[in-house]
Amino acid sequence: MQVQTPSNISETSYTRTDWQQGYLSQPNEYDYWIEEIDGEIPPNLEGTLFRNGPGLLDVGGQPIHHPFDGDGMVCLIAFSGGRAYFRNRFVQTEGYLAEKAAGKLLYRGVFGTQKPGGWLANLFDLKLKNIANTNVIYWGKKLLALWEADKPHSLDPHTLETLGIDNLNGVLQESDSFSAHPRIDPSCQWDGGQPCLVNFALKSGVSSKIAIYEFAPDGKLLRQHTHAIPGFAFIHDMAITPNYCIFFQNPVKFNPLPFVLGWRGAAECVQFDGTQPTRIILIPRSPQGGEVQILETEPCFVFHHANAWEDGNRLYLDSICYNSFPTVEPQSDFRQLDFDTVPHGQLWHFQMDLSQKTVRHEVIEPRCCEFPVLNPQQVGRTHRYLYLGAAHAETGNAPLQAVLKIDRQTGERQIWSAAPRGFAGEPIFVPRPGGTQEDDGWVLLLSYNAANHRSQLVILDARDLKPVAKLHLKHHIPYGLHGSFTPVAFLPTV
Ligand code: CO
């Protein structure tokens, strides 16, 4: 039998040209009832899927350097009575409006997009555009488009019209930001079992500060506290348990000089340092406060955590880990990325013993995967099932084309793949109303289909990952980042 190398396998599940088409800009805004449907939308699927991601991959024909620098475009798909309505709108940020009017790039991007004119034009220009492109959540009767380096923008949840930058009823001060990765505690012990939204804000420097915010379902601030942590920190996400917020301080070095001098974007000045441990920062959520604890584990890089839970003095965590973090190079084109030369995400499990101050870890799933999600009722508690965006092939690095379900109890895997011409992103789990099993629900996936250069919303039965319905949009949506589901169906009001 011929031994296939990982690169052979990954190249057979997709073509680069197909994959690249999903990175074309979508400058248009649409509103319509989705009419091309294979299968049937479950009549009891009621609510709205919101998604965010870069809608523009170029400004006035000039390509941006990295998709993370693209202007935020929010999509909604509202489900009610077996029908579905689609709408997308760009977040009308100050930068989006200014560049649209000018027809060219006016801002530098964190991930290396430079204004035209070379380094001289970019010298000492540290002004960044709040691009509002990373996540979108509905909480406290507000729809918020999130970007971790600045404040949220609030949008009208029906029309997606931008209402403006939102300081969350005065909670966020002038220089404050708000991360794109809030977590919802389904039953908070300090609020009589009510759900609460927990988020953080990071201020990085020679030493860094992490602020924790907890909000009631009506949007009111419940708790807020800030903690200093030693060293520079590049933290995108956190995990929560009933008692802790958990952060991974990835071992990176930051030399801002090339950014200040206009040679590189800020994120291109971050370098992975494999000689240093990853630090795990545990911040107590208790209103009584408590000591911040720092544990160490072997060097790895984490963007996203799947979930954490507690058992006495032990904490457990499932996260997507990379062996290292490749520096974004100024001369590179992300569309030409050689997948075989960069590490891929894998699902790792960590066990932390708080009395011994020890950490053990193991690889749960070596397949290339990202964007882990679970039943929202299990957040901070033990979970049985995880759903992830995954590569089609079992080995090697490749674009996400599939949804992988992992049963953490039995180790069983199920997979639904859109390969060879379909591409995947973050799945969203929606519990079935009245369901009693953890996996009783649907997985919603916005997938790009290169065969017709359009996107489709795939509804999978979360129990067996069999497609229940495919809703064909009339156009494509560029590969997105994160989104959320709310049980309110935001249908058109007229
Ligand atoms: Co993220």
Image: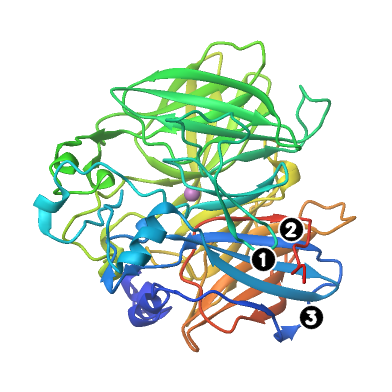
Of marks 1 and 2, which one's residue comes earlier in the chain? 2
Q: Quadrant of residue 118?
A: bottom left
Reply above or below: 97 against 26: above
Q: Earlier in the sequence, mark 1 or mark 3?
A: 3
Q: Are marks 1 and 2 in contact (CB under 8 Å)?
A: yes
Asked whether the viewer can see residue 68, the reply is no
Residue 42: x percent and y percent? 82, 72
User: Label 1 amino acid?
Assistant: Leu
SS class of the residue under badge 1? strand
Res 106 → quadrant: bottom left
Residue lying farthest to the right in this orientation = 434
Crowd band around label 2 with a 10 angstrom C-alpha radius: few (<14), some (14–19), many (20+):
many
Q: Are marks 3 and 2 in contact (CB under 8 Å)?
A: no
Identity of the amino acid at label 3?
Glu
Q: CA distance from mark 3 to mark 2?
A: 16 Å
Q: Secondary structure at mark 2?
A: strand
Which element is circle 3 on? loop
Q: Within 10 angstroms of label 3, few (less than 14), some, or many (20 or more) residues?
A: some
Of residues 272 and 3, the one nearer the viewer is: 272
How far across and down, in percent of the image, does residue 341 sit?
A: 25, 60
The label on residue 40 is: 3
Q: Please give the residue where the numbered disc 1 appears in the rendered image.
A: 444
Could you say which disc has been placed on residue 257 in the image? none
Q: Which residue is mark 2?
A: 430
Q: Is residue 100 left or right of residue 309?
A: left
Look at 31% across and 60% down and name the residue there: 66
